[in-house]
Amino acid sequence: MKLKKVMALMVSSLMTLSIVSCGSANGSTTKTDNSDTLFTIGFSNCSQDTPFFANMTPIIEKYAKTKNIKVISLNADNDVSKQNKDIQDLLSQGIDILITNPVNEDGPSAGIEACERANVPVITVDKNVKSGNVSWVGRDNKEMGRLVGERLIELLGGAENAKGTVLEIQGTAGSTTMMNRRDGFHEALEKAPNLKIVQSSYCDYDRSKAIPATQDLLQANKDVVAIFGHNDDMAIGAAQVCREQGQKDILVCGVDGLMEAVLKAEANEYACTASNDPVLMGETAVDTAIKVMNGDTVDSFVDAGTVVIDSSNAKEYANKDLDFAEMKR
């Protein structure tokens, strides 16, 4: 009897070992870690103080989640020193690749150098840096400024007939985005010799700063026929001032495709905007990160594209449930 009992226990033990072994071989054992996650992205955003920047973080996090990719996000509050510290913090948390929207092109150089030492690839999104990144996912901001300028000239009667003062509400000092949008807009307006540009102080893409700047410019300048904001948020602030002062004939335009601007364009209350869809840009940045992690070759510049939106096509992009006009992939 004792022998039979021992044999039974041995058979039972062998069966248990067989089941465990088969379970391991087939990968059917319960996982207690996060091994389903393909890799971890660190996202260092420059700030959350504009609708565009504020949308970028949840867009990247949401899209990455659909790809089984973890994202750790930090916000630099437009502080270069903080952004460098943020990147160091992300590295200490074991990120595999960094996506950053830099405060400016020189800003996060120390953080990017730390990534290079740690063999962590860097992708920039929206704004670019001078060196250290494998790819920049963004848009040609000079082209965006030029396209808006050209459309404005058309709305003012063409290069030969357009005349008067154009107020320019500037973004952030030293920002590559600001300089490129400015330069493209100026390049377009050079074709209309009777238009004069008067620039504001730097308003940091902030509507609350653009409003008093516009008030000062309107008081100091005559024959104002148009206002160009380096983003729609500031331009809409300028439009508010025009409306309050009864200057309904001043054409107001901007950049970004902010839905508030698109809806105003549909109602003929806003001249035009160049789309800068953060959804497409953020998702493209994640797709680019996946390619890098897979060892694929990526372009140094991945252009997310743009389109001019005015009263003629605003209906195609108008959607009150969105913050920005969405472009098609």
Image: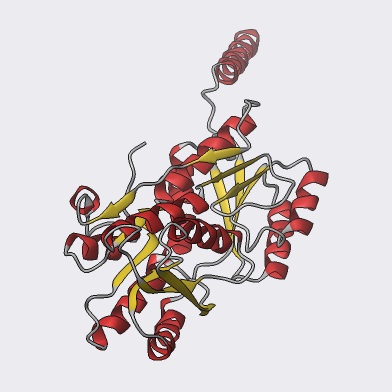
| Image vertical order of residue 79 relative to residue 182, above or below | below
Report the quarter where the N terminus lies. Answer: top right
Q: Quadrant of residue 248?
A: bottom left
Q: Is residue 37 visible?
A: no
| Residue 293 on image: x %, y % | 63, 32
Residue 263 drawn above or below residue 125: below
Q: Is residue 27 left or right of residue 135?
A: left
Would residue 179 appear left or right of 280 to someone viewing this image? right
Residue 12: percent from the left, percent from the top? 57, 15
Coloration mode:
secondary structure
Instruction: Examine the rendering and report whether any part of residue 311 can be seen.
Output: yes
Whether residue 163 sits left or right of residue 31 in the image: it is left
In this orientation, which residue lies closer to the viewer: 52 or 42? 52
When asked about the image quadrant of residue 272, the answer is bottom left
Residue under the point 40% across and 46% down: 306
* Residue at 40% in and 52% down: 147
Between 167 and 320, which is closer to the camera in this rendering?
A: 167
